[in-house]
């Protein structure tokens, strides 16, 4: 079979994303489901910037996802009813936390890094869970709604028009994903690949490995917190589950499921995850065991993920 | 002035003294070989010079600057490059990509989020020169991890050269190589030394290679310096013969 060039794949993915709200209903879905794919896909791709392209496994990315979500929700509820401001504050909060925590853990490797990221993630979870007066505790931040987008000339109704909101998310997704793509193709991005491939060689080429891992961590967390703000806006709600460790685990599952060595793999993984969750959970409460089974099969037989299967068959 | 000066470097691992008060001075343009039986502390000594770990005591001066406590990446920045006994490359990238990373980092672009056309053209040119020098041009687009052992070692040396080092440290460059590969790499090292006046320190077990290349030889045994001199002096040194060459011959 002839190899399909990468450009064709990228084109196809963008075509699907651009037209999704118009055929979701025909295949039994709904626009909000498409929005969820985008938001969680962005989160998984952000995680994969660190996991697949720097070779560092974080099991605590939900912390920054959740900080983004809480930042956006609380800004809109308490400070000013503005969607862009909510996003800005959410991303700033998540990124700032990542800068501090990243500096503490950039020297750790492998399972130690993963464990400490879980631990820090759980710290944020318990703060959100316990600090009732500020975060709403277990009930989360309720009683607010995403606001219309005021562009001066026109107002876009993000709340009532779910297609408009989908395209708003897609615009954010496009900016974030393009930035990550450009970074990975830059000299800086190649030093990250170098660290993934052989840390010792990278160091003895003169790459300050810890600083670059820190940078990669912060960039990854910045985009995952953007995904978190969009997640809160999508639900008009956020609760402590957004930053619990099982949410972090879900991001890792999405990335590995789709293929962590490929740029688009985690998006495919997120799509499978979200659709499977939506479909199976309407039949049984134990939907997670089906995802788990599917995950185990992929990891055992196709360690390079779903996109890796397609690649091997010469389709990608 | 000497390019590299090691003063009484000692490295202990628990009760084991791996390197015991070793001093060495390498002049600019010199090719120094370090020889010695297995377990003599040669690689540990290399690790002290390149900053893999610091010495327990003693000092290391590189071009007049005390680098004893500097990180490896800082020493690389000052012009010190090394290869390893077990090849350290980026196996899942092509030979060209391996060199590209080295050239870009050497050009000060390691944190650059973009690349201008002009800089990119210069980098490409430099990569092609290095590929050609190592005879890797026909294999440039294959994954370096899939190339024959000799080519992998050559690729590693080329990556070190991409850094435009003033001092090149080679840890057993011919280890595990066949006769032809050993010959090729010896010629390459000789060319670097003679044509570019590059200062080289190498650890080597193959005595033909050592006596063919070295200006001076340092002999280590049980972590200490047993002798130092020109190849002729070392070949005549009775203590060295007894400890090392005698056994080999």
Image: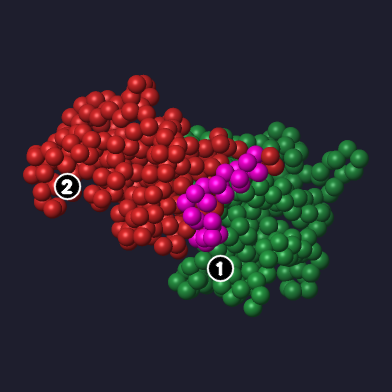
Chain letter of the residue carrying label 1: A
Chain letter of the residue carrying label 2: B
Our reading of the magenta stretch's main secondary structure is helix
Of B63 and A293, nearer the camera is B63
- Badge 1: residue crowd in 10 Å (few <14, some 14–19, many ≥20): many
User: Which residue is at 23% across, 35% downward?
Assistant: B230
Q: Nearer the viewer, mark 2 or mark 1?
A: 2
Q: Is residue B59 left or right of residue A258?
A: left
| Chain A shade | green
- Give the quarter of the image for residue B199: top left
- Badge 2: residue crowd in 10 Å (few <14, some 14–19, many ≥20): some
Based on the picture, tell me whether residue B113 belongs to the magenta stretch: no
Residue positioned most to the bottom: A1
- Residue beneath disc 1: A308
The x and y percentages for residue A180 are 64, 48
The x and y percentages for residue A64 are 56, 44
- Magenta residues, start to end: B119-143
User: Which residue is at 56% across, 68% downward?
Assistant: A308
Residue B213 against residue A18 in the figure, above or below: above
Q: How is the image coloured?
A: by chain
Asked if residue A287 can be seen in this view, the reply is no
- Residue beneath disc 2: B37
Residues beneath discs 2 and 1 located on the same chain? no
Of A77 and A177, nearer the camera is A177
Q: Which chain is red?
A: B
């Amino acid at each position: 079979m002839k190899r399909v060039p990468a450009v064709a794949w990228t084109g196809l993915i963008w075509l699907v994303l651009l037209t999704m709200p118009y055929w979701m209903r025909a295949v039994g879905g709904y626009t909000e489901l498409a929005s969820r794919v985008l938001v969680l896909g962005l989160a998984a791709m952000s995680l994969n910037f660190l996991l697949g392209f720097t070779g560092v496994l974080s099991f605590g990315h939900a912390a920054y996802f959740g900080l983004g979500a809480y930042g956006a929700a609380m800004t809109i509820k308490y400070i000013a009813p503005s969607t862009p401001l909510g996003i800005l504050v959410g991303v700033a909060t998540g990124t700032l936390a990542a800068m501090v925590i990243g500096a503490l853990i950039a020297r750790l490797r492998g399972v130690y890094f993963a464990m400490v990221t879980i631990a820090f993630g759980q710290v944020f979870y318990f703060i959100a869970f316990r600090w009732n007066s500020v975060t709403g505790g277990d009930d989360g931040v309720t009683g607010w709604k995403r606001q219309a987008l005021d562009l001066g000339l026109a107002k876009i109704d993000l709340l009532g028009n779910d297609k408009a909101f989908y395209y708003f998310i897609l615009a954010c997704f496009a900016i974030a994903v393009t930035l990550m793509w450009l970074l990975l193709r830059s000299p800086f991005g190649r030093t990250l690949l170098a660290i993934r491939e052989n840390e010792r060689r990278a160091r003895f080429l003169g790459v300050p490995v810890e600083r670059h891992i820190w940078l990669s961590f912060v960039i990854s967390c910045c985009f995952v917190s953007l995904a978190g703000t969009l997640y809160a806006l999508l639900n008009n709600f956020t609760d402590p589950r957004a930053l619990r460790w099982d949410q972090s685990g879900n991001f890792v599952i999405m990335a590995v499921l789709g293929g962590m060595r490929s740029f688009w793999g985690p998006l495919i993984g997120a799509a499978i995850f979200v659709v499977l969750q939506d479909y199976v959970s309407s039949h049984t409460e134990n939907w997670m065991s089906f995802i788990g089974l599917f995950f185990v099969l992929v990891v055992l037989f196709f360690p390079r993920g779903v996109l890796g299967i397609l690649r091997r068959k010469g389709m990608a | 002035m000497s390019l590299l000066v090691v003063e009484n470097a000692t490295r202990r691992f628990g009760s084991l003294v791996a390197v015991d008060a070793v001093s060495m001075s390498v002049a600019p343009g010199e090719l120094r070989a370090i020889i010695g039986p297995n377990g003599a502390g040669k690689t540990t000594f290399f690790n002290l010079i390149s900053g893999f770990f610091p010495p327990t005591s003693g000092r290391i001066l590189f071009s007049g600057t005390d680098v004893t406590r500097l990180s490896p990446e800082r020493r690389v920045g000052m012009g010190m490059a090394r290869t390893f006994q077990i090849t350290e490359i980026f196996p899942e990238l092509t030979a060209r990509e391996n060199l590209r990373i080295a050239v870009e980092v050497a050009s000060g672009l390691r944190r650059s989020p973009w690349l201008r056309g002009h800089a990119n053209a210069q980098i490409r040119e430099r990569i092609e020169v290095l590929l050609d020098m190592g005879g890797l041009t026909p294999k440039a687009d294959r994954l370096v991890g899939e190339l024959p052992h000799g080519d992998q070692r050559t690729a590693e040396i080329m990556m070190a050269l991409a850094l435009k080092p003033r001092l090149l440290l080679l840890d057993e460059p011919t280890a595990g190589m066949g006769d032809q590969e050993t010959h090729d790499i010896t010629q390459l090292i000789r060319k670097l030394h003679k044509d570019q006046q590059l200062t080289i320190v190498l650890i080597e077990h193959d005595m033909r290679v050592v006596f063919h290349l070295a200006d001076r030889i340092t002999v280590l045994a049980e972590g200490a310096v047993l002798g130092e001199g020109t190849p002729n002096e070392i070949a005549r040194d009775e203590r060295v013969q007894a400890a090392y060459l005698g056994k080999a011959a």
